[in-house]
Amino acid sequence: MTRRHLIAVATAVAAILLALLPPLWVRATGDEVTLAMRPVDPLSFFRGSYMDIRYDVPTPLGSNTEDAERGDAVYVLFADERPGRALEVTIERPSPTDGQFCLQGRLQFEQIEFPQLEQLFVNADRAREIDALRGQALAQLKVTGRCQAVLIDIVPK
């Protein structure tokens, strides 16, 4: 194997690790929280067993979101309850205190979307269990103090 091949392989491996390490770090070090959710599509013929998720997050706009436009990044500060309750939406990352957590999302019309938390892939048996919970389920997340989050599972209310 030539030096060029080794560099190409090392670059590819480094890129894969850089993509995988942040979510794994959040899973390992984050705090567990729950959010109210609305499942959208529990099964797809082409994509298999997965679930598109939208979150029931009322959006109390903060004092500095007047200039935010559709598609802008926003941060939602939540009270750490079951399910989490939205306290404030800002364009600057908040510093959560004890009993709070935050998520980064995107402003879409009058709602906030969390693209990194909107799909869950599961096996067929788990998909049927989740489908049976329809309307009575919460999204279980791991979050860090820097508003990073990973969707872990769907749990009963």
Image (cartoon, grey):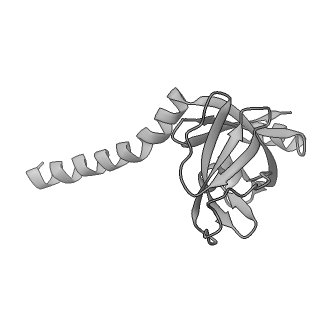
Q: Quadrant of the C terminus?
A: top right
Q: Which quadrant of the structure image shows residue 33?
A: top right
Residue at 69%, 53% in the rendered image = 48
Residue 31 in percent (x, y) is at 60, 28
User: Which residue is the extreme one toward the front?
Assistant: 63
* 95 sits left or right of 13 in the view: right
Residue 50 in percent (x, y) is at 71, 50
Q: Is residue 2 visible?
A: no
Q: Is residue 109 visible?
A: yes
User: Which residue is the extreme one toward the left?
Assistant: 3
* 77 sits left or right of 54 in the view: left
Q: Nearer the viewer, residue 67 or 73?
A: 67
Residue 117 in percent (x, y) is at 64, 49
Residue at 76%, 66% in the rendered image = 110
Residue at 62%, 72% in the rendered image = 69
Q: Nearer the viewer, residue 90 or 72?
A: 90
